[in-house]
Each structure stands twice: as C-alpha cells, then as structure tokens.
Image (cartoon, grey):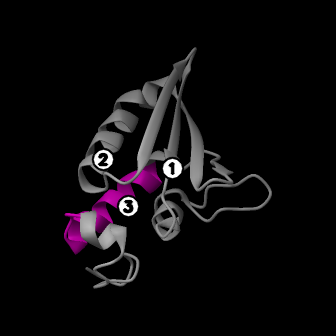
Amino acid sequence: MGSSRLSAGDPTNPVERACSLDEARYAERVARWRELCGDADPDYLPDGGVKVRFPAERSGRVLELVAAEHQCCPFVTFYLTLTSGYIELEAYFPQGTEALLTELFGVPSTSGGTCSC
C-alpha cells in the first residue's frame, strides 16, 4: 500500500486491515470519487461524516461507488436519500480514518466545505 493510503503498513489502522485494493485500483477509486464530486459542495459534519447532494441523474454512479466502497471499506457507514431531483449521500468515517474522508471528498473547510475534488 502506498503513501497516499494512510499510514501504510500499520496493521492497527482500520483502513489497512480492511482495504482490499492494490495501489493502482485505489488510485482509480479515488479518481472516480473526485470526478463524481467535482462540482459538489460537501458539508463536513462534526461527527466524522460528510453530506453531499448530487443531481438525480448521477444516482447510478453514486450507488455504484457506494457499493464498491462498502466492499473495500466496510467500516464506512453510508446513508442515501432520494428526494425530488436529488440524491443525498451521507458517509461517516470512524476515528482514525479522517484522511480517507479528505482524500475521497476533498479538504474539509470550517466554512461549510468546498469540494477540492
């Protein structure tokens, strides 16, 4: 596992224990998340989560990535809400995995968050 993946080689790190992706597949997964959230404006939640709203036409891509991420990182909790014209994703990352949240969704901002994807 490479340097972009949280303390590589640390067997106590929940990402290291659970992530089954090799370096190339991990980089591709991060790129897919960043492409998906490119024009989104994530709201970083104080309890280790993020809330992102996407247009309904992206629902398939959101569901596909959530399913893939759940296979690799079952320690992340996802909630999806479909509303008129939108799909809202909430993802909660346990303590110690904040770097993964940042890597997938951008750098949290104290002003409500602007996706740097």
Point 47% across, 35% down: residue? 79
Q: Are marks 2 and 1 in contact (CB under 8 Å)?
A: no
Q: Which of 72 and 35 is in front in this view?
A: 72
Q: Which kind of residue does numbered mark 2 sit on? A: His
Q: In this view, does 77 lie to the left or right of 17?
A: right
Query: How many marks can you see?
Result: 3
Eye-nearest disc, 2 or 3: 2
Q: Classify residue 46 by image quadrant.
A: bottom right
User: In the current view of this chain or complex, which residue is farthest to the front?
Assistant: 12
Point 58% across, 41% down: residue? 52
The relative height of residue 22 versus residue 39 in the rendered view (above or below) is: below
SS for callout 2: helix
Q: Which kind of residue does numbered mark 1 sit on? A: Tyr
> Can residue 66 be found in the magenta stretch?
no
Residue 70 — which label? 2
Which residue lies under the disc numbered 3? Answer: 30
Looking at the rendering, in which quadrant would you find the C terminus? bottom right
The crowding category of the residue bearing disc 3, from other C-alpha atoms within 10 Å (few below 14, some 14 to 19, many at least 20), is: some
Q: Main secondary structure of the magenta part?
A: helix
Point 44% across, 41% down: residue? 78
On the image, the x and y values in percent for residue 81 come to 51, 25
Q: How far apart are marks 2 and 1 (CA)?
A: 12 Å
On the image, the x and y values in percent for residue 95 come to 52, 65
SS for callout 1: strand
Point out the tag, 2 or 1, that comes first from the N-terminus: 2
SS for callout 3: helix
The relative height of residue 58 versus residue 112 in the rendered view (above or below) is: above
| Residue range of the region highlighted in magenta in the rendering | 19-35
